[in-house]
Image (cartoon, rainbow, N blue to C red):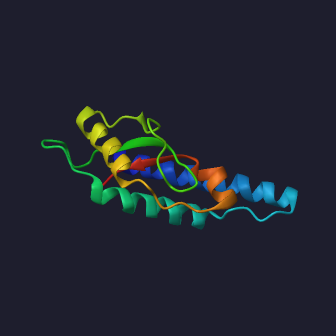
Amino acid sequence: EEAERLAREEELAAAALAATEAESAENADQVEPLASDIQFYAAAIRGRILPFWIRPTGTQRDLACIVGVQLLPSGDVVPDSVEILRPSGDPAYDRSVVAAIYKASPLPVPTGRLFDEVFRDFKFAFKP
């Protein structure tokens, strides 16, 4: 249930961000990033991290946490920038997620405005 709730929150946050950007675009006559672009890169980032993640022995299967990470335009993770914003309740699980993110660096990121507005300081739910 918690993982599903976190997934819904992430989807709502992405939709809210896309709606805000679309409204800004109308006001400024500029094309803003689409929610589908955000979802594409968010999925690519999760896909890049997952092979580096090792589930700690004895952890539950349905854990999830919210992670914040700062990225450089190259996709490299800024040293000491990964933080658990909403813990899973299992410190070993949370540490394993942080380690996997650093190991997966560089992460796939877009260029230009989409990177600057969304992915420079990226937050996402990690749930394998």
Q: Is residue 74 left or right of residue 52?
A: right
Above or below, comparing residue 25 to residue 56 in the picture: below
Q: Residue at x 31, y 38 (%)?
A: 94
The extreme left residue here reads 58
In this view, the residue in front, 125 or 47, is 47
Estimate the x, y position of residue 114 in percent, counting from the top left: 65, 58
What residue appears at the point 19 percent right and 44 percent down from the top-left corner?
60
Q: Position of residue 50 (x, y in %)?
A: 32, 57
The residue lying toward the viewer, choosing from 27 and 109, is 109
Q: Is residue 65 above or below residue 110?
A: above
Q: Residue at x 69, y 57 (%)?
A: 113
Q: Does the image show residue 112? A: yes
Q: Residue at x 27, y 52 (%)?
A: 53
Spot occupied by residue 54 in the image (x, y as percentages of width and height):
22, 50
Q: How many marks?
A: 0
Q: Is residue 31 above or below residue 126?
A: below
Q: Is residue 90 visible?
A: no
Look at the image and tell me in which quarter the C terminus lies. bottom left
Quarter of the view holding residue 79? top left
- Which of the 4 image quadrants contains residue 121? top right
Q: Position of residue 107 (x, y in %)?
A: 45, 57
Of 121 and 29, the residue lying toward us: 121
Asked whether, in this view, residue 95 is left or right of residue 32, the answer is left
The answer to which image quadrant residue 14 occupies is bottom right
Horizontally, is 100 left or right of 31 in the view?
left
